[in-house]
Amino acid sequence: MYQLNKVDKTFPGVHALKAVDFTIGRGEIVGLVGENGAGKSTLMKVIYGAYQPNGGTVSIDGTTVRFQNPRQAMDHGIGMVFQEQSLIINLTVMENIFLGFEQQFVRWGVIDWKAMAKAARHQLRKVKLDIDPAMVTSQLSFAQRQLVELAKVLALEERIKGDLVILLDEPTSVLAREEVELLFSLVRELTSRASFIFVSHRMDEVLELSDRIYVMKDGAVVDVVTQAEANVDAIQRKMVGRDVDKEYYREQLQKPYDASKTLVRFDRASVAGKFSDISFDLHAGEVLCLVGTEGSGREAILRTIFGLERPTGGTVDVKGASHCATAQEAVARGVGYVPRERKVEGIVDGMNVYENMTLSQMGRFSTRGVLRIAEEKALAQTWIDRLGIKTPDVYKDCGGLSGGNQQKVVLAKWRSGGSDIILLDHPTRGLDIGAKEDVYDMIREMCNEGAGIVLVADTLEEAIGLSHTILVLKDGIFQKRFDGSPGDKPTLYDLVHHMT
Amino acid sequence: MSLEKLKPYFPWLTLGVLLLLVGAVNPSFLNPASLLQLVADIVPLFIMAVGMTFAIYIGGIDLSVQQVANLVTVIATVYLAQFGVFVTVICIAVGFAIGAVSGWVTTRQFVPSFVATLAMGFIALSGARFLSGERALSMNAEARDASFGWMFGNTGGVPHELIIAALLLALAWFLQTRTTFGRALKSVGAGELAAVASGLNVHRIKILAFALSGAFAAIAGLMFSVKLSGGDANLANGFLILAIVAVLVGGTPLTGGVGGVINTLVGTLIVVVIRSAMVYLEIDATMQQMIFGLILILAIATTIDRSKMRIVK
């Protein structure tokens, strides 16, 4: 029995976990769901020892424990199967399984490879994987690697006395449906050896596999439901914490777009390995949202419009001419890109407000390469006032602004430069409610000024609330198109149904 | 005032403290005339360090500068008689081209700049050896004085070398702070990904940064050659570590994005004071390289922005 009692975790400026109670019994499978930023990953890191809680206690079978690092957690039977695959792919399978625990095979100072192979085979049998442990990991499929990860964690069994608790972080994201079935039946069988914490964005899978489900929102556990009483709608409502509010997303400000003016046209366009056969038109005044899971091709489409990827099939037209070959060309033709990683791609940390705002349009503020800095400052001051950017002055280093104000600087950069094709990748990620609403206001304003917006939203509610048009993608392939006129918007379920 | 806010002033403080210390031990060191001469003597090093600043400002490094300077001493000596003062153009073009190739190799072939510039340095060294026939060459004294004699006069007690250095510093400072190129350099150094996402031609900016570094190294080599009235493939040896130390102790960290050419001025002065102090303190010449090696490590360890470098190999 593994238990968290009123566990708190704070980072500077963020209360990431608020008095979280969590228990998992022997042989139990517990699901963990929540929106991005709800605190799932922080909670997992506390469980496997990567973070130390600031308050509350962690106990195993009634004994209080405190882990300084993941290794100590492993010594207590807690193992993590990482989403992004923690295997080192140029090592063999057996080296990976026993990475950091090779001492047991050392004879006279050298590793007894035969003994290691034998022990590795034993671990691989637990996950029903019939491969040579001396194979190099890079030769395995993703599904096989996932199982090797699991075998690696199960190898703890022989080393420790108590029960195992195994965290599975989005284990199905790279697997095909049949592989998911296999993994699930394996996990169910393994409950005789271990209990599992299953974290996934795929709600149906969580419902299918878990005995109980913890629902998180804003760093707190808001509900615990058993499999019998769980249903997708109820859980999603709990995750969001409110019924979707029309005003929140400024639906009353949503106006029809200008169908006569096409800004971007994808005609059966493909980028090898990213997406294929995608067609859509982006019009002036339209918010077009790309919906899908991680790796569904959303980001690649944005990057293609911005000239960072080249279409390998079909055609991409920008304002009636061929696709942009480089980012410089895209910017020159009026494309603005608001990347997901605001702090490293959005703003330049180390440059001040006016330097950031004119970075994409220095040509307009210079004469033969010499900057007209006074004009830059005047522009920055205009936009600081217009968008209510909270900064002491134009000289403030953007790295020191809050996330919402950083995002306003990034948006001001493109709007002041007259960009009319705006690519927004998770524009509200990590922002608080007020800052999110400011971003929504700006999206509506830009549409009214005739810009077309391609949005990859942070949440599905946001996608529905903001969009004129929604395209659902899965594994780089178009699934379904929804019209998002106010009063006729698709539901969450409509989207999720086509995403997974 | 917090330590973080004081950080930009550390190089100035260091310089002041060093001057006071050396002055206390040997008051004659602070005599203005001798100080001026001391500074004039290291103008070639300073110019090389100013160029190097561009490479380090974008988060790279240029290890070829010493060899570029060596090559240029040979070129200047060999072609002085033929081209007169216009040999300057050839020298700068050669340095610019070598730097541009380093930049191209770094950005297009993904060879880290320390390897790319090290390799280009060896290529330049070979060129210098070939051209000089592995001999130490001397300039024709008349041709030298006719073309470059003006370099060593005084105007109102200020050595002309210092005026050249000041002009080049002003040019570099103008480029860094007042032009779109300088702004682009800063964005590449402080946040390359954001520069890419803003549609900047990051490759071209980097190539230009290395090319400028090469051009400044060539000017340094030319001045040194004229000063010593000759050229050979080893003439500028020993400059490289001093130039790197000057940039780093001046406050432009290896991670780039902050600091700049004014910092390099301070850094160079710190290097000069330390070097003369070692002479006063009669530290053996064989020990001096070791001390600068240690200072280099110390300077990098204290100035580097660790949040930008998670893994160092």
Image (cartoon, rainbow, N blue to C red):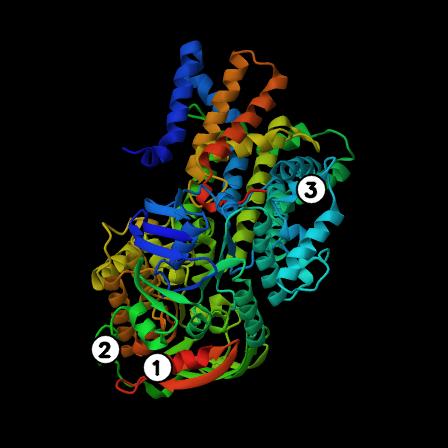
Between marks 3 and 2 in the image, the one whose residue lies nearer the viewer? 2
Residue A320: assigned label = none
A200 vs B81: above or below: below
Q: Furthest residue to the bottom?
A: A260
Q: Nearer the viewer, residue A284 or B153?
A: A284
Residue A125: x and y in percent read 66, 61
Chain of the residue on which disc 2 is drawn: A
Instruction: Tell me the crowding category of disc 2: few under 14, some 14 to 19, or many 20 or more residues within 10 angstroms, Cα based.
Output: few
| Gap in angstroms between the C-alphas marked 3 and 2 | 68 Å
Q: How many marks?
A: 3
* Three-letter amino acid code of the residue under disc 2: Lys
Residue beneath disc 1: A284
**Do the dots labelled 3 and 1 sit on one chain?**
no
* Three-letter amino acid code of the residue under disc 3: Ala
* Residue B150 appears anywhere in the view: no
Instruction: Tell me the crowding category of disc 1: few under 14, some 14 to 19, or many 20 or more residues within 10 angstroms, Cα based.
Output: many
Q: Nearer the viewer, residue B250 or A130?
A: A130
* Three-letter amino acid code of the residue under disc 1: Ala
Q: Earlier in the sequence, mark 1 or mark 2?
A: 2
| Gap in angstroms between the C-alphas marked 3 and 1 | 56 Å
Residue beneath disc 2: A246
Chain of the residue on which disc 3 is drawn: B
Residue beneath disc 3: B124
- The local secondary structure at tag 3 comes to helix
Residue B278: x and y in percent read 53, 16
- The local secondary structure at tag 1 comes to strand
